[in-house]
Image (cartoon, coloured by chain):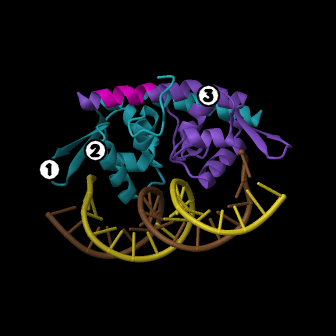
Chain colours: A purple, B cyan, C brown, D yellow
Amino acid sequence: MAKSVCHEGTCPLVVAQNIIAGKWKLPILWKLSQGTKRFHELQKQLTEISQGILTRQLRELERDGLVHREVYKEVPPKVEYSLTETGQSFIPVLQAISIWGRDYLSRRLA
Amino acid sequence: MAKSVCHEGTCPLVVAQNIIAGKWKLPILWKLSQGTKRFHELQKQLTEISQGILTRQLRELERDGLVHREVYKEVPPKVEYSLTETGQSFIPVLQAISIWGRDYLSRRLA
DNA sequence: CTGAATCCTCTTAGATACTG
DNA sequence: CAGTATCTAAGAGGATTCAG
């Protein structure tokens, strides 16, 4: 691992980055790590995200296997989003990033 | 931390993401975690990056305090890049991302 | 309620040519 | 060697409108 070359398409670093690249991917995963949520619930909590973008980023996370989308055939529609097992496995990384960000902020202010 | 709201400008998750958002940021930090490198050395190892982009992303990492730029006033010019203390503190996160990416790949292939 | 379809804007990457 | 300057193309975010 120490000598992995990052210009390959299979570089783990690049693979991971492509998945979390979207502006709202990390916050979405963070919210879902707190439990299953409906579409509108997510949108409320990510106050500044627009509907279209939320839809797209959720679809991408679903395609990448981190998020599960459960559709209830009702009227009005009800859709619930949750983390898959793969999505759950990302939580420690999420925490590592968050902790580093917090340290970074306090460092910058010092 | 558990109830942090990610729409704030001071959300650690968002702060961290803004820093590592560039396409080549992670690979650059990875290479520099292996030791001090000169500009051309980095460019060789990140085989597909163009000169202009490498310059810009290095400048951004420098501005964000992760990378140190040491200029030797010689002819021809010699410039060395290395991680600052803040940059070093990011290495564990880099490893966490890399390990997750590796697991993700093997999971997808299984 | 959830989300598809458009359209618009802004940022980024990438390529190329030039410079101290 | 290590940039700077400029241009182009692609993509992502965002706002709005329409639909099941």
Q: Is residue B98 left or right of residue A110?
A: right
Q: Is residue B108 visible?
A: yes
The residue carrying mark 2 is B63
Q: Magenta stretch: give its range.
A: A99-106
Q: Is residue A86 above or below residue B68?
A: above
Query: Do pointers 2 and 3 mark residues of a single chain?
Result: no
Q: Position of residue A24 (x, y in %)?
A: 54, 44
What separation in Å lies between label 1 and label 3 (alpha carbons)?
Answer: 53 Å
**Callout 3: residue from which chain?**
A
Q: Amino acid at mark 2?
A: Arg
In this rendering, the label closer to the viewer, 1 or 2: 2
Judge the density around disc 2: few (<14), some (14-19), many (≥20) Cα neighbours within 10 Å. few
The residue carrying mark 3 is A33
Q: Quadrant of the N terminus of chain A?
A: top right
Query: Do pointers 1 and 3 mark residues of a single chain?
Result: no
Q: Does the magenta run of residues contain A100?
A: yes
Q: Residue furthest front?
A: A76
Q: Amino acid at mark 1?
A: Glu
The residue carrying mark 1 is B74
Q: Is residue B30 above or below residue B78?
A: above
Q: Does the magenta run of residues contain A58?
A: no
**Callout 1: residue from which chain?**
B
Q: Quadrant of the C terminus of chain A?
A: top left
Q: Amino acid at mark 3?
A: Ser
What separation in Å lies between label 1 and label 2 (alpha carbons)?
Answer: 24 Å
